[in-house]
Image (spheres, helix red, strand yellow):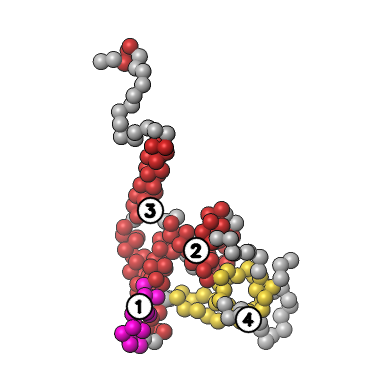
């Protein structure tokens, strides 16, 4: 059994979404693997499979080691193990969400655009001395997520399909070029007598 770490829990608002956030004794933050997946419309096993994939290992580098469980600190008398679960550093949650965007997940796409825009707005607000409450920020983020989801629904599946087709075409084009074949040239080779016109 992996070693567990005690953490404190707080509700974190992301626009209209509320997720459980956890702070470890060292001050770092975590999100449950389950909520990381559910926030972008996936099941927990999807996040677990992603964390075990070669793609994640390449994206996260060598520094990430899975296996830490957290245990929620509580005043009530709970049986040990009832509140233990696998938690992910926020950087890993973002890597997972970005990967979901790459895979065409519109919910992840809307969420990340809204969060990235909010992050930039916070920096601009700070530079220009603009003060907003967290409620105002959440209202703006909620409206942005809803607008993006609506726009993506109107855009339809072409949003991801066109990119997939382009990516596949580029792959096969590079494969042909690696084998010294001009992808846009006429086929060469011996033609049989019946093929001559």
Badge 2: few (under 14), some or many (20 or more) residues near its Cα, within 10 Å? some
Taking the magenta stretch, the answer to whether it contains residue 82 is no
Q: Is residue 174 visible?
A: yes
- Closer to us: 19 or 55: 55
| Quarter occupied by the N terminus | bottom right
Label total for image: 4
Q: What distance separates the C-alpha of mark 1 from that of mark 3?
A: 28 Å
Asked whether the beta carbons under mark 1 and mark 3 sit within 8 Å of each other, the answer is: no
3 vs 4, front mark: 4
- Name the outermost residue toward the top: 193
The stretch in magenta equals 117-131
- Local secondary structure at mark 1: helix
Residue displayed at 71% across by 67% down? 2
Residue displayed at 38% across by 68% down? 113
Q: Which residue, given by chain and number where applicable, does mark 1 sit on?
A: 121
Q: Which quadrant would residue 171 be assigned to in this image?
A: top left
Asked whether the beta carbons under mark 2 and mark 3 sit within 8 Å of each other, the answer is: no
Q: Which residue, given by chain and number where applicable, does mark 2 sit on?
A: 95
């Amino acid at each position: 059994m992996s070693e567990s770490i005690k953490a404190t829990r707080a509700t974190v608002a992301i626009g209209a979404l509320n997720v459980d956030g956890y702070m470890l004794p060292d001050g770092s933050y975590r999100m449950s693997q389950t909520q990381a997946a559910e926030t972008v419309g996936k099941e927990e096993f999807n996040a677990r499979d992603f964390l075990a994939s070669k793609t994640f290992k390449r994206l996260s580098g060598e520094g990430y080691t899975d296996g830490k469980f957290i245990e929620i600190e509580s005043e009530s008398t709970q049986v040990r193990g009832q509140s233990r679960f696998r938690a992910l550093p926020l950087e890993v949650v973002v890597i997972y969400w970005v990967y979901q965007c790459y895979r065409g997940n519109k919910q992840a796409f809307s969420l990340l655009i809204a969060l990235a825009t909010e992050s930039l707005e916070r920096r601009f607000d700070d530079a220009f001395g603009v003060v907003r409450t967290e409620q105002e920020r959440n209202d703006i983020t909620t409206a942005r997520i809803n607008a993006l989801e609506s726009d993506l629904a109107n855009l339809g599946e072409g949003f991801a399909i066109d990119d997939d087709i382009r990516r596949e075409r580029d792959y096969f084009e590079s494969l042909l070029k690696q084998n010294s074949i001009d992808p846009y040239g006429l086929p060469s080779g011996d033609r049989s007598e019946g093929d001559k016109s």
